[in-house]
Image: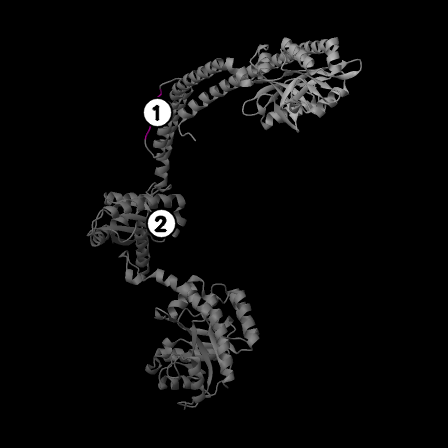
Amino acid sequence: MFQRLQTKLTVLYAGLFALALSLVAVTVYVAIASNAQRTVRQELAASGTVFDRVWALRTQRLQDGADLLSRDFGFRAAIATHDRPTVESAVTNLRQRLGLDLAFTVGVDGDVTGMDPQRLDLEKLWSALDAEDGAQGVFAIDGQPYQLISAPILSPTLTGWIVFAARLDEPEMRALEKLSAIGLDAQVFDQRGGAWISADHGPVNSALAAFVGQAMHDKLSEPRMLRGGADSLVLVKPITTLDKASGAALVLRYPMAQAMAPYRPLMGAVVIVGLIGAALVAAASWALSRGISKPISALDEAAQRLQRGEAVAVEVTTRDEIGRLAQSFNLMAEEIREREAEMTRQALHDGETGLPNRRALERTIEGRLAAASANQQVVISAIGFDRFPQVRAAIGYELATELVAKLGQRIMDIAPGVLVGRLTTSILCVVSDRDDLDEVLTAADAVLSKLEAPICLGGEPVDVHITHGLAATGAGELDAARLIERALIALDQARAAHKKLMAFDAEAYGDPSANLSLMSEMLEAVRSGALYLNHQPKLDLRTGAISGVEALVRWTHLTRGFVRPDLFVDMAEETGHIRALTDYVLAQAIKDQAKLRAAGHDVLMSVNVSGRLIDDADFADFAIAQVQAADARVCFEITETAVIGNPDVALGVLERFADAGISVSIDDYGSGLSSLAYLKQIRADELKIDKAFVMTLESGGKDALLVKSTVDLAHSLGMKVTAEGVETREALAALQLMGCDLAQGYFVAKPMGLDKLIDFLGEWSIDLPAEAPARKLA
């Protein structure tokens, strides 16, 4: 919530003080309220006792007057003779002397003398008087409660009753309130029709009515608290009623707000003192927290600056914990600066030679590129040790590292303005201080002999042979990583061309990114069936029939057009996707052969298999299962060098092909490093002579001799011979005379689609140049 420590401390201390003061104030208030309530309870109880005494005295006074008049002989005689004037005179005289509100007589016959009988509920009154001698209690007259006292009139038998009534009105209650030490409120309530009615205030509120009703029901004799808009302590004193079916009560009520009034100044003083104390505590807390937070804020700011890599130091102003913390921070900051400097040095330098590493080189190159103008170049050179693994094996790793470091130092001595760093174990990178590639090429060629001078290691001279690969770029063309990559490619290009110094050749390098995307597109073409097969027929030179075809994969790209097979097939081998391509070609070739059979042409289907798959047992299982499931006649064409990498496994796979009835043909024989040792081990059915020898047969010479000897060699090993590249009738005749078995080339037919192949086979005929000689197998 709060962002500053100073504010947090101030709020915390002030809040704690306010909380403590609140607890004190609440405690004081509760104690005062409890004491006031106890005092009011006592006063209410005392007032109730006074009321009981006053009510008893008043009742006794009225009862004595009624008894006196009822025993008077003249009054009884007047009652007996029904002398109404005399009765009324006597009753009026006594009412005035006693200060009564009402005085009247009720005869046994219900006759009323001294007041209007319409004002009375005569039936209830007569029943009450008749039920009890000397009946007394509260009775309603004209809807108002009165205290009634009665006495029987005997002449000598019961002739009626004398009744005195004192109204229980507001003046009576005020007189009672004056007898109390506290300013309580006294009211008389009587029950009429189930509702409690005040003698002077009319109907009361529902809360007080319910309270009075509950108190009368529970016969409560002690004051109880009445909750509401203004809490009050209420004492309900039951009053005897003349009509036993109804009830009456004296209600003494004292508001608690009035009881708490004398203490309000004290509570106000407590609040004022608390506010003043809270303000003082807040001010003191603010000052204290400022003394604590100020040095902490300084430490925080210093920590942020330290995080940004700035050199910082905090002023130590005290000797307390905060001062010691500042001292510790200063020591920590110094140690961090030292460690960062060392880490930076290690991050930007090679750990073995001490030369700048690739990261440092890239930073420098990026800086040069940012500062270069439009007509300036940033030129770098990748200098690689030739035959470094052999040199390292001869002199050891430690001296080989020293050799790299000394060559870097030699370069800096010869060209002081350059930056020399180590890219790899055996390659240094030189960032030139010149901005023209031609100038750097000339300068590098001039100092080449100096750089290749022997370096003395351990007292012995070591020959140095190096190759330079240079690359240059302008501002905004390449980033540092791409420029270094070009220099390394230039180094490889120089080594491939057997040159000591060479700049990056973009045209020779081509577009690798496009070729890489070509592989993903080729895989998609394999999945969608966008690749297709062309088939080139093979002519049997003995019968003149087409006995076989070679399946050749083709691809017409949607945007690139026709893609050369040697491009995507070679890339498939390099990227490891040749298996997917070969699986597709084999499956499609089997389908095409089935269609050829359906058209009446049973020819051997030759499929080229990469040397990378010959030692793949999974591929062998897949190929054999496919061929056997379709009962296909298939020949796998492989190169002789395919068995060189892993000869035991490869020869075993070829044996499995032969056992499964799959023919094997050795393709492009004579174009590579042919080995008779492997040739005699391969279980092959056919040997194909490379077209480089066949296309020059017409000129005779060595090629004709080599072809003839190859034919004889293959026949002696039990293999048929197929000659590729037959483009003339003369070459075909020469091969026929040499005893060659099959011919393949443009003179016979170019590669063609399946539909054209079916038409071609249906129309095929040829006159062989000469009759083929008989062939004997060794």
Q: Position of residue 448 (x, y in %)?
A: 25, 51
Question: Residue placed at 57% from the left, 75% from the top?
Answer: 629
- Position of the N terminus, as image quadrant, is top left
Res 72 visible? no
**Amino acid on which disc 2 is placed:** Ser
Q: Residue at x 45, y 23 (%)?
A: 12
Residue type highlighted by circle 1: Val
- Residue under pointer 1: 314
> Would you call the spot at circle 1 few (<14 residues within 10 Å), some (14-19), or many (20 or more)?
some
For label 1, the SS is loop
Q: Nearer the viewer, mark 1 or mark 2?
A: 1
Q: Position of residue 633 (x, y in %)?
A: 52, 78
Residue 423 part of the magenta-drawn span? no
* Gap between marks 1 and 2 measured at Cα: 48 Å
- Front residue of 587/413: it is 587
From what the image shows, is residue 192 above or below residue 557? above
Determine whether, in the image, residue 46 is placed left or right of residue 468: right
**Mark number displayed over residue 252:** none
The residue tagged with tag 2: helix, strand or loop? loop
Task: Identify the residue shown where x is 34% and y is 81%.
Answer: 700
The reply to whether residue 555 is visible in this rendering is yes
Look at mark 2 in the image and give the residue it sits on.
Answer: 426
Q: Magenta residues, as a range?
A: 311-316
Q: Earlier in the sequence, mark 1 or mark 2?
A: 1
Q: Is residue 706 left or right of residue 470?
A: right
Q: Look at the picture and state if 39 lies above or below 206.
A: above
Query: Looking at the rendering, which quadrant does residue 282 occupy?
Result: top left
User: In the picture, residue 753 is in which quadrant?
Assistant: bottom left
Instruction: State the predominant SS element of the stretch in magenta.
Output: loop
Which residue is more in the foreground, 684 or 585?
A: 585
Magenta stretch contains residue 313? yes
Establish if 730 lies above or below 374: below
